[in-house]
Image: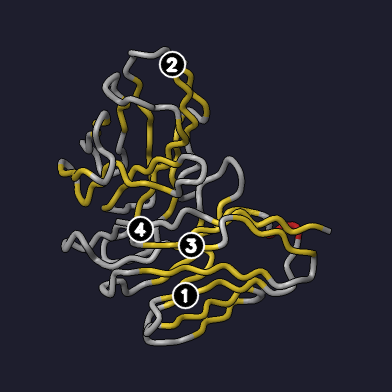
Amino acid sequence: DGGITQSPKYLFRKEGQNVTLSCEQNLNHDAMYWYRQDPGQGLRLIYYSQIVNDFQKGDIAEGYSVSREKKESFPLTVTSAQKNPTAFYLCASSETGTPEAFFGQGTRLTVV
Amino acid sequence: QQQVKQSPQSLIVQKGGISIINCAYENTAFDYFPWYQQFPGKGPALLIAIRPDVSEKKEGRFTISFNKSAKQFSLHIMDSQPGDSATYFCAPLGAYSGAGSYQLTFGKGTKLSVIP
């Protein structure tokens, strides 16, 4: 089955710890994205990558970092610098030149 | 700057009724107007989308109406069913990045509840 796999589905971390969220896709898409979703806020773009070894900041990149060493993988690290990291994180991908985005099932991060 | 305004924030509709969700945008560079559907605990999925060269598109019970001059588009769900209960997002876009990938600009969502 083609799709986007995010893991884990639920993640708990103590305040001050860095945590990495996994995103893998087998759709052969060049573009990948990370969004953050908070209640009543819609989805906000954290980072996106159009091609391997290249990525760009989105609207709310502060406190986050990413890497794109492989086409199929786009992990997101939530650092201790992120002031309010508890949220639902969504990874997406799209084929270059086409507008439809395909989303993973999300990771719900809770920082205590 | 809020580029996309979606309304209403929540909507309760009787089974069999019509659900209408609206999206107003500011950026005239947008050239693709989709609606995404999201069930609780899941990622959004594309429901239906329209290009600006047509004013209406229908797929089953779902219809998009597009008003270019008013910079608005809406989602109509006919014969609404309890299984349609979800959050709906408009996400108009254009090729901002210039290199072929698209950045979606999401509305804040409309939580639809269809009651039996």
Counting residues from the N terminus, which is met first, the one under dot 3 or under dot 4?
3
- SS class, disc 4: loop
Rendered residue at 58%/53% (across/down)? B87
Give the residue pinned by disc 3: B6
- SS class, disc 1: strand
Give the residue pinned by disc 4: B105
Q: Which residue appears farthest toward the front when viewing the image? A: B1
Mark seen at residue A13 = 2
Label 2 crowd (10 A; few <14 / some 14-19 / many >=20): some
| Image quadrant assignment for residue A56 | top left
Amino acid bearing label 4: Thr
- Position in image of residue B10 (x %, y %): 62, 55
Relative to A52, say whether A7 is above or below: above
Decide: marks 3, 1 in contact (CB < 8 A)?
no
Amino acid bearing label 3: Gln
Q: Please give the chain letter of the residue carrying mark 4.
A: B
In the rendered image, residues at marks 3 and 4 fall on the same chain: yes
For the residue pair B2 and A94, the one nearer the viewer reads as B2
Q: Please give the chain letter of the residue carrying mark 1.
A: B
Q: How far apart are marks 2 and 3 (CA)?
A: 34 Å
For the residue pair A32 and B71, the one nearer the viewer reads as B71
Q: Distance between the residues labelled 2 and 4?
A: 30 Å
Give the residue pinned by disc 1: B73
Q: Please give the chain letter of the residue carrying mark 3.
A: B
In the rendered image, residues at marks 3 and 1 fall on the same chain: yes
Counting residues from the N terminus, which is met first, the one under dot 1 or under dot 4?
1
| Image quadrant assignment for residue A67 | top left
In the rendered image, residues at marks 2 and 3 fall on the same chain: no
Mark seen at residue A80 = none
Counting residues from the N terminus, which is met first, the one under dot 3 or under dot 1?
3
Amino acid bearing label 1: Phe
